[in-house]
Amino acid sequence: MVLLILLAQSIDMTTPSLYKSFDTSLVDVKRSFESTEHATIEGSCGEENRAPSRKPDGGNDVGRVVKSVGAGEVYRSGRGLSADCSCRATCDTDGNFLQAVDDVQMEEILPKISELVRDVKTLKILDLGCGTGRTTTKLAQHSWPCEQIKIEGWGASAAMLNTAKTNLSSLASSHTAVNLHQIDLQNPTTLPHDSKVSFDIIIISTLALDHSPLATFFQLISTLLKSGGVAFVSNLHPDMGARSVAGYDDMRGARRIGRNLSHGIEESLDAAKRAGLEVKEVKEVELEERGIEEGLVVERGRKWVGMKLWMGLMVRKM
């Protein structure tokens, strides 16, 4: 297959720098919890129902409420049950630099994937962990070299999916169909019944990898991909994951910090291989000093200079 030959030629290991202006709102765990007695290296400051702390957080506003929430709660909390626990109003607009990095990298990866699926007449794509549709929108707007495009967005939060529905409402056409589904990755019965061995492309954009055990995550990808299908997974780089976690400001101004399952790159690659996936490309992004000096990154991002921030990997189902 042409698809497989092209993929075999794409093997790469690169570490580009940032060339775009990014804010850096991920929380520095070491600074943020240095005065919080129950802090851990993962950024967990206790059980989910523990009262929020008003202790100074070092790297953020003094006296600001900071509350730890469980893995994935940063995204699942947008179910619409309470305005206080919804991140949907700010998760795409609070200056999270990781999303900005991901946007730039996606501009490079989508044309590459397009070349790999040029011979597919009806292309079926999954945005797994679609949130408010940030990446789904890019998939719908991209010029795919196929007659018909069928895109599905799967997410855990009903409220965020409603936002995605609004954002995507004007993008459907006779050429491109977009459908959204609420699912729970921990409960396979919530997955669409016809989804097995169904997709040509799967995109998992930032952080979903840290919310599930690796074996479960990559086995799901293997189950959903067609033979020869391609998945691209992007995530917070483990070097930075050791010092930061995703967070958002709730409607009361409190900072909610997630507790993630941080995975190393080699650990992720091994899990992918055990699930029957062939690793075709690994990419890492590092922040350079000139990013600060040239105004590409705001001054408060200086603490991340020299740090690898983002990772992406492409796999193929054998």
Image (spheres, rainbow, N blue to C red):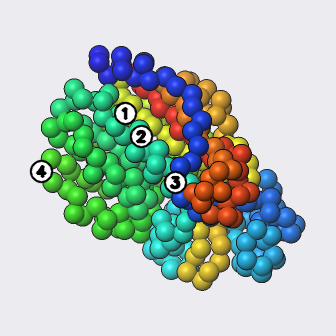
Give the residue at mark 4. 174
Residue 175 higher or lower than 229, as above or below = below
Residue 272 vertical position relative to residue 162 in the rendered view, above or below: above
Question: CA gap, disc 3 to disc 4?
Answer: 35 Å
Q: CA distance from mark 2 to mark 4?
A: 26 Å
Q: Residue at x 20, y 56 (%)?
A: 172
Give the label, 3 or 4, closer to the camera.
3
Q: Residue drawn 57% across and 31% down?
A: 14
The x and y percentages for residue 97 are 56, 58
The correct choice, above or below, for 119 with respect to 66 in the image is above
Are the two marked residues, 2 and 1, in contact with CB atoms closer than 8 angstroms? yes
Q: Secondary structure at mark 2?
A: helix
Contact, CB < 8 Å: mark 3 with mark 4? no
Q: Secondary structure at mark 3?
A: loop
Task: Identify the amino acid type marked 1.
Answer: Lys
At label 4, the amino acid type is Ser
Query: Label 2, label 3: how many angstroms apart (C-alpha)?
Result: 14 Å
What type is the residue that disc 2 sits on?
Answer: Glu
The quadrant the N terminus occupies is top left
Q: CA distance from mark 1 to mark 3?
A: 21 Å
The disc placed on residue 108 is 2
Q: Earlier in the sequence, mark 3 or mark 4?
A: 3
Q: Badge 1 local density, few (<14 within 10 Å), some, or many (20+)?
A: some
Q: Earlier in the sequence, mark 1 or mark 3?
A: 3
Question: Which residue is labeled 1 in the image?
Answer: 112
Residue 20's disc is 3
Residue 232 in percent (x, y) is at 45, 37
